[in-house]
Amino acid sequence: MRYRKRAIDLNKYDELISYIQELESVAVAFSGGVDSTFLAYAAKQALGDKATAITVDSPYIPRWEIEEAKELAQQMGIRHVVLKATIHPSIKENPSNRCYLCKKVIFSNILEEAKNQGAIVVMDGTNFDDTKDYRPGLVALKELSISSPLMACEWTKDMIRAKSKEVGLTTHDKPAYACLLTRIPYDTILSNDELERIEKSEVFMMSLGFRAVRVRSHGDLARIEVDRDARKRLFDEVVLDKISEEIKSFGYKYVAFEASGYSMGSLNRQIGESNE
């Protein structure tokens, strides 16, 4: 808590670098998001060739995110490994504890690959703000002894974005994203086709300039959420017709918009918590 109102100074970043250096050799669970990119950058600075970034390529991670992660790793000069994964049987029906189960499987795979790469410790990008939210996946990380330097050194999201901008990381203003499983109601059987049409729908919305967007999938209905500040851009007849036509071409029969705009973890209302 002592850093929350302090400006980010050299000593604060040095503290993070020292923390990572003490781990000797690391593998970073690398999604290409704001947090994991900043952590990978710091790990590379701290340990050089003793730092590896590991990205998991699964059906519920958008293709554009995988490609972006590859580009970012190349730009940072960090060794990068991409692990292929499938939808694990434990989450096939999208249970309410999906995030815990998924993290347990995914990070177990990352731990195994980390050993192959000679890494002693696996790190993830959990930050200090994440302790305030409902994050069942954090339980799995704790059980697997995953290190979270950004949380340990009390780096908040705003601080990470500010320092990322300062050091020239293009992710400094990247919107928050979550895996595609968060677009599907709990207790719904998952399929690659369903995930693919969600991804296509979101990519299309992004092509229209909606950077932070979620397409929640309810069977034949696509429920679109955009940033609250971007809602007014939707209400143009030409834009609405274009969205309706394109989204339906991906297999939906109906297209609707969330009146209140994007809300983190909106599908978690059925369990009364938020994990996205």
Image (tube, rainbow, N blue to C red):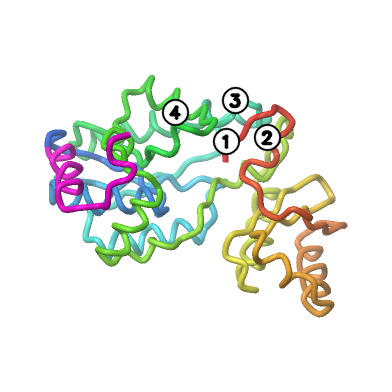
92 over 157 or under it: above or below: above
Percent x, y of residue 258: 77, 53
Q: Do the residues labelled 2 and 1 touch (CB within 8 Å)?
A: yes
Q: Distance of mark 1 from mark 4, alpha carbons?
A: 11 Å
Q: In which quarter of the image is the N terminus?
A: top left
- Determine which of the numbered discs, if any, sits on residue 268 in the image: 2
Residue visible at 33% across and 61% down in the picture? 72
Secondary structure type for disc 4? helix
Mark 3 or mark 2: which is in front?
2
Instruction: Between label 4 and label 3, give the one nearer the viewer.
Output: 4
Marking on residue 97: 3
CB of mark 4 within 8 Å of CB of mark 3? no
Give the amino acid type for the residue marked by disc 2 in the picture.
Asn
For marks 1 and 3, the one nearer the N-term is 3
Q: Earlier in the sequence, mark 2 or mark 1?
A: 2
Relative depth, front residue between 259 and 245: 259
How far apart are labels 2 and 1 at the CA level? Answer: 7 Å
Nearer-N-terminus badge (4/3) = 3
Q: Is residue 266 visible?
A: yes
Residue carrying label 1: 275
Which residue is the site of mark 4?
138
Relative height, residue 49 to residue 242 (above, below): above
Instruction: Name the element at disc 3.
Output: loop
Query: Looking at numbered disc 4 in the image, what kind of residue is underneath it?
Result: Leu
Mark 4–mark 2 Cα distance, whole angstroms, equals: 17 Å
Which callout, 1 or 4, points at the residue further toward the start of the chain? 4
- Kindly identify the amino acid type of the residue bearing the numbered disc 1: Asn
* SS class, disc 1: loop
Magenta extent: 1-21
Q: Quick one: label 3 or label 2, which is nearer the N terminus? A: 3
Instruction: Tell me which residue sits at (38%, 33%) in the image.
Output: 109
